[in-house]
Image (cartoon, grey):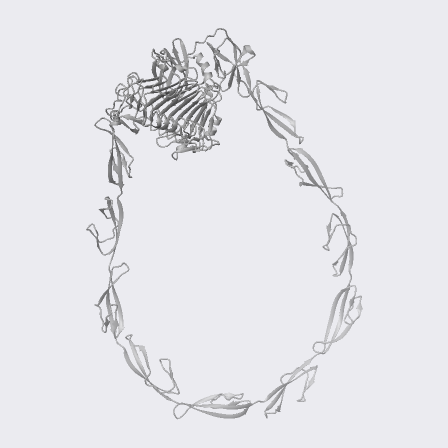
Amino acid sequence: MLYKKTQIIPLFLFLLSCLFYTNHTLAITRVVTNTNDSGTGSLRAAISSAVYADTIRFSPSLLNNGNATVTLNSEIEINKPIILIGLYNQSDTVFISGQNSNRIFRINCTTNYHGVFMDSICLINGNTQFSGGAIYYWKAKKLTINHAIFKNNTSQGDGGAIDLFSSGVSGTHDLHLEVLNSTFSNNTVTSSSAAGGAIGLSGYNNNQYTIDISYCTFIYNSAGSGGAIGLRNHRGNTTLTVRTSTIAYNNAGNGGGIYVKDGLYAPRTHANVYTSTITYNTTTHSGGGIYYQTYLGSGGSSSSYNYKLRVSSSIVAFNNTDDVLCRKYYNVWGPYNFYSSNNLFSVSTLSGVNANQLGITPAALNLGPLQNNGGNMLTIMPGIGSVAINAGSSFDLSDAQNGPIEGGRRDIGAAEYKVCVANANTGVDSIVACDSFTWIDGNTYTTSNNSATHTLTNAMGCDSVITLNLSINHSSNSIDTHTACDSFTWIDGNTYTTSNNSATHTLTNAMGCDSVITLNLSINHSSNSIDTHTACDSFTWIDGNTYTTSNNSATHTLTNAMGCDSVITLNLSINHSSNSIDSHTACDSFTWIDGNTYTTSNNSATHTLTNAMGCDSVITLNLSINHSSNSIDSHTACDSFTWIDGNTYTTSNNSATHTLTNAMGCDSVITLNLSINHSSNSIDSHTACDSFTWIDGNTYTTSNNSATHTLTNAMGCDSVITLNLSINHSSNSIDSHTACDSFTWIDGNTYTTSNNSATHTLTNAMGCDSVITLNLSINHSSNSIDTHTACDSFTWIDGNTYITSNNSATHTLTNAMGCDSVITLNLSINHSSNSIDIHTACDSFTWIDGNTYTTSNNSATHTLTNATGCDSVITLNLSINHSSNSIDIHTACDSFTWIDGNTYTTSNNSATHTLTNAMGCDSVVTLNLSIQTIDTTVIRSGITLLANATGVSYQWVDCGNGNAPISGATGQSFVPTANGSYAVQISNGICNFTSACFSFTSLNVSPVLAQENVRIYPNPTTGMLHLESTQSSFSKLYLVDHLGRIVFSTTTQQNNTSIDIQHLEAGVYVLILEQEQQRSYHQIVKTNK
């Protein structure tokens, strides 16, 4: 292997522009972020917005919650070359589903020179009443599918999973389907007249149809014809190659595994089956493994390439009817152009075979079940001793479907016998542990586990996979709570005399693990007390006994508050009660110590007191009752009477009593019956002026209330009259007055001057003469004028507010003499004035009040003095308009002339220009100018032209043809194929520039080798790339990246070779092959593992 320094291959740049319409360096990766049918972040949106060679991936976050399914409501059309990469991890997958109601993808690249690449996709539940349940491949140069799963897809027409169909003009819709490392299961064609349960082809025009299938598994698919693969070619040139694949358990009417029907008008269908296993397929008619029908032969050419059906190093066995059936036109049966070598067939006769084994029995072939025998998918592997082992082609050492070849020679069929697959064994290590367990893998498990595995090496040197079946039981903990008195003996045999919550004891629980019991012990204590009592005569205690004597030894046991014994000792003192008689003699009634009043003699009543010992002292009453007597003592007296009781009574009385003692020694009650008559007293009242003579003949000149005179009344008692005499006297007084101007006195006269001699007689309060003398002083009132000048209004001393001039209003005050002082108002009213000061200003305005206003204002005022000396109030009416600022944004190419008249040749964001806005204020415009320039220089290297500018679009033009665009020449580099003059037009989406022209006079291109003579697989690849030539051997190989750099080269002289490119970065490369002075170019897709 030879690595060279980086160099430019001019011819590759020309081919790269043919492979992609746009420069691959401009392609981007688009990420699907949700599972919605449409909208932002959906798969449909990503495909719709993709441009040539874009890569579409799925966000890893879609698998955060396990499997995810993109559910489509209608098919998605792919109309441009893209790379679609699915998403999966060890446990979860992103599925793309048609919901059993619609197809998933329609491949319809309108320019039929580009390919679509799909990797790691899982297409499920596609359904259509037409063809292609999952993918309808109609237009695109090539469809490559790698590491894919097609499951449960259904169509009514051809191709339950994938259908290739071309109905365009011959030669315009060539189709090439390459499927690698993929599984097709449970896909169905429902029509009995349609073909291809997994993959179908309907070719109606003279186009080239190529189907390459490598390292794939087809299981449980069904159709009318071709349970797995069904081709119905009517006119085109068709080549089917199945390599290193498993086709099993499929079902159809004809061709349980593969069905190929050649065209009547174009018998150019070739089917090749290499290193594959076709077994256990079923049909209802013919061709259980392979059914091939053709119309015309090759004329018996000896070239193996002319064989219509080639089967090599394959197992075709145990299908329910013929393993291989070839049918020629007009029902002539038998092998026709059938080439076979190194195969195993279960049929005993089969013509036209070479180096095959026929009639193989199941025991001889010893096939294992359909299972994972290594690799990425299910296979059927030959078992120990199988005739297939090491019986395949000795020239083909490429990997089997389940991994590399072992033993130096490949086995017949798709799967290689793997010693360690056949001899690997498994076992289960069942463990029951408590709490945790450390296994042979070194891990400590704390929960039950039946999924952990550990691989050892068995006696055959192969893996012995042991699965852990671990049941983790858990120790238990409990608390044993006790409360005891004084001491406690626990299950551990210890006796505790104090409380304890730390002692533990371990038993075994029901799960067989430790049951740790913790003691929670509370020790309470017994108590002792003395119950002291003093009782009279006897005492019944809490023990139920009655004690009649003192006792300090009896005990009784109760339970205390802690639940323990409370021992009580009795301390009893017995005292004794006493009896006595209480003798009494009483009159009429007696109230004893018991509170009762007795009216008769009694000697039985008792009363209990407490004696000195605190006991009952019972007293018995001995009572004798005697009775008192009553009498009345009558008397009549004047004014007062002194009775036997020593009292003097002044009023009649019949209730007074006096008690003496009768013969029984009891009360003798005497009641007084007294009538009192009274002397009379009266007052003889008189009022007299100066003197009075009374009934006693005396003349009194002064008042007297003590003189008396006695007569006899009607009751025969004294009638005493007392004089009440009031002597009143005549009076004299002076009536003084001070008056203003005049005075009318009590005598009815009006005096206008002072007077002190006039008199007038009245009756005084005593009813006697009252002589009054006038003492009069006459004073006089005054007048004045109060003159004022005011603005608008004036409030005067009278409290009134005047708003007009006034010379008649008066107000009366009191002068210094105490008389009226009459004031007349003389008022002149002047008026203040109001005005509005109107202004319009820009941004701000400073007014007469000294303030600067920045907003409109109609409320501000300022006060001056008018011609009459009053306020002149001015109101501001201000309208503030505003200056405006704006940015004038321009993008120009090379230069720009602005409104300021200046021409700018560089970008500028600081220039300003001032206009007047609609409000009459400044309108300041700031220029924001971006001057676009593009580097138009071109580097010429040999016959390659490379534009220096990046991040722009390119169009190479023919300078000799009026700068006419060259079709497809839109890359950064250009390699002309004919003499002429060329330039590049460069655009950044805004400006367009054209470079200088470059002339070429001697160009020559080597002939190109037809690509169909070379088979390259797998493509895409993660590392190894296998090359096969059906003609001459390879001489040189070059691998060139998208920048034209040779990243790999080697020389060889073989028809078949392999190269390892796993060290290269993922991307698109061109493989250049040289054979016999010819060169072919191939697009290679390198992916990551």
- For the N terminus, the quadrant is top left
Residue 960 or residue 829, whichever sits in front: 960
Residue 348 drawn above or below residue 693: above
Q: Is residue 655 above or below residue 529?
A: below
> Where does residue 122 sit, x and y in percent of width and height?
39, 29
Which quadrant would the C terminus be assigned to in this image?
A: top left
382, 938: nearer the viewer: 382
717 left or right of 615 in image: right
Total marks shown come to 0
**Quick check: can you spot residue 968?**
yes
Left or right: where 1046 falls relative to 939: left
Q: Where residue 141 sits in the image (x, y, percent)?
A: 44, 20
Q: Residue 690: x and y, percent? A: 70, 81
Say which quarter of the image contains residue 115.
top left
The residue lying toward the viewer, choosing from 679 and 665, is 665
**Residue extending farthest top:** 1002
Q: Indicate the quadrant where residue 832 lies.
A: top right
Q: Is residue 197 visible?
A: no
The quarter of the picture where residue 418 lies is top left
Name above or below for residue 840 compared with residue 889: below
Residue 351 x %, y %: 31, 18
- Front residue of 145 and 330: 330
